[in-house]
Image (cartoon, rainbow, N blue to C red):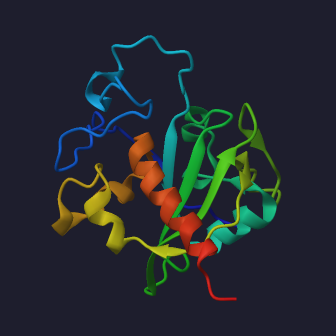
Amino acid sequence: MTSAVCHIAPTRPPRVPTTPHGPPRVPGGVGAVSVATASLAPMTHLDTRRHWVCSISLEHVLLGVEGGFAQAEHGRDTRLRALRRGDPIAFYSPRVAPGSQVTLQQLTALGEVSDDEPHQVEVRPDFRPWRRRVDFEEVGRVPIRPLIALLGFVTDEQRWGLPFRSGLLEVTAGDFGVIAGAMRDAVTHAPR
């Protein structure tokens, strides 16, 4: 088994979403603060999770889902060390298989890192890749193109695929929410 290369790419600072009436309001009724000023209020819970998208062929995604793992960088552990237990991770598959000319361009899996460190497995005597355990959830596959305009890490819609070439991409919680929401909605509304 081979693995796709995932490199960590830096992310931009998150954008504050706006509505036609200004920044959205935080729930709370009278006196609720806007998202733009919410960071000034004391926080009782700080979400320290990082959010990831890994570009990898569908063939490799399916192996990972079946085995409950994520593997990157041709089995090296370097990039996998950046992921932490509880971090959500989505998988984008530009192609069906490595080296294939068949394009897919779909978000294909969604999960959460469920271990504390990379672990090594023996696939064959000359290939002992490092992996992270991932708890996958049931989601639908969705085309990426309809989501491009909603993703803050895509700064040039004409060259939307560039950020995905980095392999393992850290994204904002808002961008991850767009991705995860579309994938969860796809399985909820799938024909039976």
Left or right of 184: which side holds 100? left
Q: Is residue 114 above or below residue 167?
A: above
Name which residue lies at 81% across and 49% down. Answer: 121
Residue 27 locus on image (x, y percent): 43, 35
Residue 185 locus on image (x, y percent): 55, 68
- In the image, 185 versus 106, the foreground residue is 185
Say whether residue 108 is visible.
no
Residue 62 locus on image (x, y percent): 68, 71
Quadrant of the rendered image containing residue 11? top left
Residue 134 locus on image (x, y percent): 72, 49
Left or right of 30: which side holds 181? right
Name which residue lies at 51% across and 59% down. Answer: 181
Quadrant of the rendered image containing residue 150? bottom left
Q: Find the residue positioned furthest to the top.
A: 42
Name which residue lies at 26% across and 28% down. Answer: 36
Left or right of 126: which side holds 12? left
